Amino acid sequence: MLMRNFYQLYFCCLLMIGHGTFVLGQERKDSVYDLQQVNLNNKKPIDLIAPQTLDGDILTRLNSHSVADALRYFSGIQLKDYGGVGGLKTVDVRSMGSQHVGVYYDGIQLGNAQNGVVDLGKYSLDDLVSISLYNGQKSNIFQSAKDYASASSIYLQSKKPQFKNNKKYNLTLRYKTGSIQLINPSARFEYKINDQISTSLSSEYLKSNGEYKFRVIKRNADNSIANDTTAIRKDGQIEARRFELGIYGNHNTLSWNIKGYSYLSDRGIPAAIIRNGFGAKGQTLTDKNYFTQGSVQKKWGKFESRINLKYAHDFTHFVDTVSSIKTQNKYTQQEFYFSSANYFKIRSNWDMNIAFDFQYNKLDATLKNFSYPQRYTQLLAIASTYQLQRLKIQGSLLGSFVREQVEMNTSAPDKSVWTPTLIGSFQPFTTRDFYINAFYKRVFRMPTFNDLYYTNIGYSNLKPEYTNQYNIGLDYTWRNLGKLHYLNAKIDMYYNEVEDKIIAAPNGSMFRWMMMNLGKVQIKGADVKIQGHLNLSDFDFKSTLNYTYQKAQDYTSQSRSYYKDQIPYVPVHSGSFILNSTYKTWGLNYSFLYVGERYDANQNNNKYNYIKPWFTHDFSIQKSFELKKIRFNGSFEVNNIMNKYYDIVLNYPMPGRQFKIIISTYL
């Protein structure tokens, strides 16, 4: 009965939009709605709340290997990195948990129903044109229902073929080598089939032994040094292959694209360094990830529709033959996804979007007594934006309907939840590029398959997590100040709550743990960003300064000794600075990253839980030149110039000073 009413509501909304199209069809036609965000650093973004974005030369020249490395330079981000090229890398935004971060590749979400997080170390920067972080959600309402479902979202936009001077093809060859025995060649080929259709094919190979020096200092109770050891990190080896195929079509008011993606890797799993255990532990992980996705978009006057489709197949093989308990676990995930988004411009200052998504997830595992869960998720989003002179308001309502079934044990109960979002932006002065913006958003997160069904740990009656987000921001831009093209300053102040937080806790014995709802977290913080562009004749400078203040406190129970203490791995102070400079065909780049003191457990009054601050300096130099009409670019990078030894995750040491050489050829 619930599902039937759901479908009736969705199709009634579509009929309302269609009727509105007929009635208002005689009004003046507006320009084609801009579907892809264009973020030019010297122009005001079209969003009610502008995202943080890395694109263009700044992204290309950033001393980063993967998406995870680049995201470190965004404010409000906490990166969990277990070390090396192949170590697991996930992000947490504003301390609400990694599972509350949606990651989208060309507009379609990368899923992981098993544990709810995406390993961002798998995604290279070579094929990306931009990375954007949205707190809350995109201000552009023409999006799928899933886009409304995350507390924060990361959008990875891949390159699309562009042809100049009547060229029929583009070819990019790139080779990277450096410390940690890095071998990393890649290639990208683009071909113009005709004026409407083009295709791209890219591939990448990555190999490293993952070995690097690190330093461990153990101190006595009086802070004197008890042990000072330099060792070689083991189990960080990786061999990975990435292949990507894209086909793109554009015919007047119709556009479409199809993408195939595969990632195959064999890597070691770096173990925690405990009790001077520096040797290899022998744990390995094999990943085979495939997905095919497509999108088609059509415009009829004031009405526009987009359909997304995706199928994903992920295989993981975990092997541990060294520990006393031998383990060989295999996991297979399958996902099917369908989305229909329908946008209608009611008037020049009023638009509306209705989106429906369906997603099916299935998990198989070679575990004893496993439940073999399947999940059916349906989402309905209704959103509207209205502008009254200098005031712009957007509201959305998301309905989430989840049904699960299992072959063994007990399935989680069905869920039916509605969650709202309200966004506003106001420009006080027409002659000033100054904006005041705010938003409120409530988010529902269904527990992952591991939370619910993992043998002996999962608990099928877990409640979903809920978050409440409150944000107010100020955004001011000064333009054309002589040699200073622009200067932008932005501050966001926010308050977040996480209810029914899902954690792992002992169940009668320290040797047996179970997932449970326990805890309430309150997060108070501020993000500050200053960006500028200075031009001095042949010299060009672009810089970005980010700072984050964050108090993320545990409000679970006043009887606990850690009541109101900072939650694990969240620094109170953190920040970054990026400076990109160019002179003719030369480029110099510098970046600085700082993370303040943290704790690896809830109790802040225990010195053994304390993790000291860390910082890194990175530097690179680039040179572009031509030889026989072939363009070349050479780059030399030094990461962690000061050879700072540090842990992002306690007992998982990060590399010291590293070098990298990159040679790129463009045909």
Image: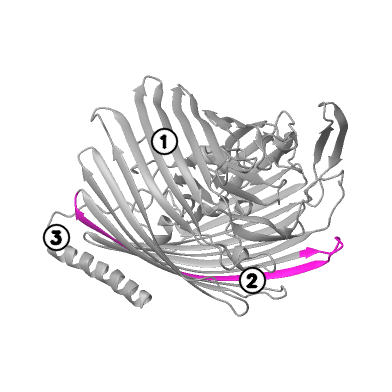
What crowding class fits label 2: few (fewer than 14 Cα within 10 Å), some (14-19), or many (20 or more)?
some
Q: Can residue 168 be seen in this view?
A: no
Q: Badge 3 is on which residue?
A: 24
Main SS class of the magenta portion in the image = strand
Residues tagged 3 and 2 counted as in contact (Cβ below 8 A): no
Q: In this view, does 581 lie above or below 463?
A: above
Residues 152 and 55: in front is 152
Tell me the amino acid under the disc marked 3: Leu
Q: Badge 2 is on which residue?
A: 332
Is residue 361 toward the left or the right of residue 429 in the image? right
Tell me the amino acid under the disc marked 2: Thr
Considering every residue shown, the one lying at the far front of the view is 559
The Cα atoms of the two marked residues, 3 and 1, are separated by 36 Å
Labels 3, 1: front one: 3
Q: In this view, does 316 lie above or below 96?
A: below
What crowding class fits label 3: few (fewer than 14 Cα within 10 Å), some (14-19), or many (20 or more)?
some
User: SS class of the residue under badge 3?
Assistant: loop
Q: Is residue 127 visible?
A: yes
Is residue 273 toward the left or the right of residue 71 in the image? right
Picture coordinates of residue 312 (x, y %)?
55, 68
Q: Earlier in the sequence, mark 2 or mark 1?
A: 1
The Cα atoms of the two marked residues, 3 and 2, are separated by 50 Å
Residues 109 and 503: in front is 503
User: What mark, if any, has residue 41 been given in the picture?
Assistant: 1
Q: Give the range drawn in magenta.
A: 319-348
